[in-house]
Image (cartoon, grey):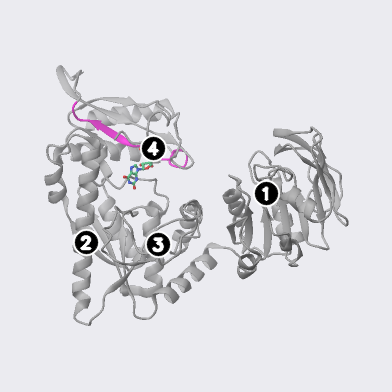
Amino acid sequence: PVLVVDFGAQYAQLIARRVREARIYSEVIAHDASLEEIKAKNPAALILSGGPASVYADDAPAVDEGMFHLGIPVFGICYGFQKMTTALGGEVANTGGREFGRATLTPNGEGTLHRGLPDTQPVWMSHNDAVQVAPDGFTVTASTPGAPVAAFECVEKQMAGVQYHPEVLHSPHGQEVLTRFLYEIAGLKPTWTAANIAESLIADVRAQVGDEGLAICGLSGGVDSAVAAALVQRAIGDRLTCVFVDHGLLRAGEREQVQTDFVAATGARLVTVDAEDIFLGHLAGETDPETKRKIIGREFIRSFEGAVSEVLGDQAASGKKVDFLVQGTLYPDVVESGGGSGTANIKSHHNVGGLPEDLEFKLVEPLRLLFKDEVRAVGRELGLPEEIVARQPFPGPGLGIRIIGEVTKDRLDLLRKADLIAREELTAAGLDGQIWQCPVVLLADVRSVGVQGDGRTYGHPIVLRPVSSEDAMTADWTRLPYEVLETISTRITNEVPDVNRVVLDVTSKPPGTIEWE
Ligand code: XMP
């Protein structure tokens, strides 16, 4: 891999993504990793990320300078650029030329990194100190008002660096510069493609599970669990059993999507647990959001456990047991939790609902090195239909937390109709790519007066909650075209009985959460 050495920059993951966008595999590694750990990864190149500190500060993150003498290509960014400078004998100083935010970069026409790019270009900067003198043998290729040496390179040593942040979109030529380092200076080839990724992940799963091992996977209907299951199915065939819990809180068509589309595309062995009556029974009379969530979580575990023991029962005759649990964990989660190992025993929480501690499985997490867009690309490569691969996020507790008030079958049916209309119209208007998700919420305990035909109505409001987001941590309400809102409103009030009003939620997150409960 290309290793991104993380100096505590919020940008390290982003750099890894950009390298992968250049179709070269990349991973993040902590800056205090030993030289041995770095060598063990057999890196094709190192990229030193930015960081918060000055290279001269007492608490400046250290780096084993041996990494500059491994004969491996190195690219330094911001703090990493300065670290590289001092390690190789150049000079860094604080001369008051601090730059934060947009700056203008002027390439001087020399070298490879900025060859042929515009004479001046905006770049994103964040520094106090600046490189004053490049190390011996390095060519300076660009400057900014606050950084006389804003970029340098040494093709012979296969090393280069820039003071600015090429990984952010505010540096419009950044990706090109990074790609030039990778292809032209480090001599790497773009081989990280969906087909290659899928092939190598399938081989990894085979190696982990072995020739005999049995695995189980909870399908939520979401992209991650579907792609993880599809990969494992390719690797071990019928030794994987997928479990889908139909809790009655699903949207229109979701069960069919899993039972028909997913199975048709993958040939996976699927057990569906019909648990609608059980879930609705336990939810009867409950209106408190947290209580509802807890009931749904608890019943989910019970259903899943029931299915697991059924699968175990099947195999008990031959003396086998299910050793492996497949999970759709993605790379950002792995990096954020400090990079866990692939074989940890399950603790209390879990993508599809939280499994009890006494269920001991080894985890199979085939997506643990991938970003979401890569997961989608692999899903397409494996032949999963677009309806599954391009799916927007949907919460595990389903429509149960989109009915404000008690959850009943009638209310669910009503909400399913309204939700389907909203989804149909958003798709027809080509807006799916612009919105992160659009919860449709039924205010079951609210009534308002309306008029329809010649009569008075006293019905419920439906809330539309379209949001735009990068990661669901923060969100803004999506400015949907009025015509689309009009069509959705007209159709819902005409087609859904007992609904006489449609309202739009115009709250960002924070202060509102995306879901209403
Ligand atoms: P909130 O409402 O917290 O939602 O702004 C953030 C994102 O998480 C989804 N969500 C859930 N997903 N189980 C899930 O798998 C849950 O219990 C759950 N609750 C919220 C929500 O749809 C949004 O994308």
**Quarter of image, res 343:** bottom left
Task: From the image, tell me which residue sits under label 3.
Answer: 228
Q: Residue at x 17, y 38 (%)?
A: 407
Task: From the image, tell me which residue sits under label 1.
Answer: 175
Q: Residue at x 60, y 54 (%)?
A: 16
> Rounded to the nearest whole Å, what is the CA distance between mark 1 and mark 3?
30 Å
Q: Residue furthest bottom?
A: 318
Task: From the image, tell me which residue sits under label 2.
Answer: 305
- Magenta residues span 431-445
Please state which amino acid type lies under the numbered disc 4.
Answer: Leu
Choose the circle earlier in sequence order: 2 or 1.
1
**Quarter of image, res 487:** top left
Q: Is residue 416 visible?
A: no
- 64 left or right, relative to 429: right
Tag nearer the camera, 2 or 3: 2
| Most frequent secondary structure within the magenta stretch | loop
> Rounded to the nearest whole Å, what is the CA distance between mark 4 and mark 2?
37 Å
Assign a secondary structure to mark 3. helix
Asked if marks 4 and 2 touch (Cβ < 8 Å), the reply is no
> Rounded to the nearest whole Å, what is the CA distance between mark 2 and mark 3?
20 Å
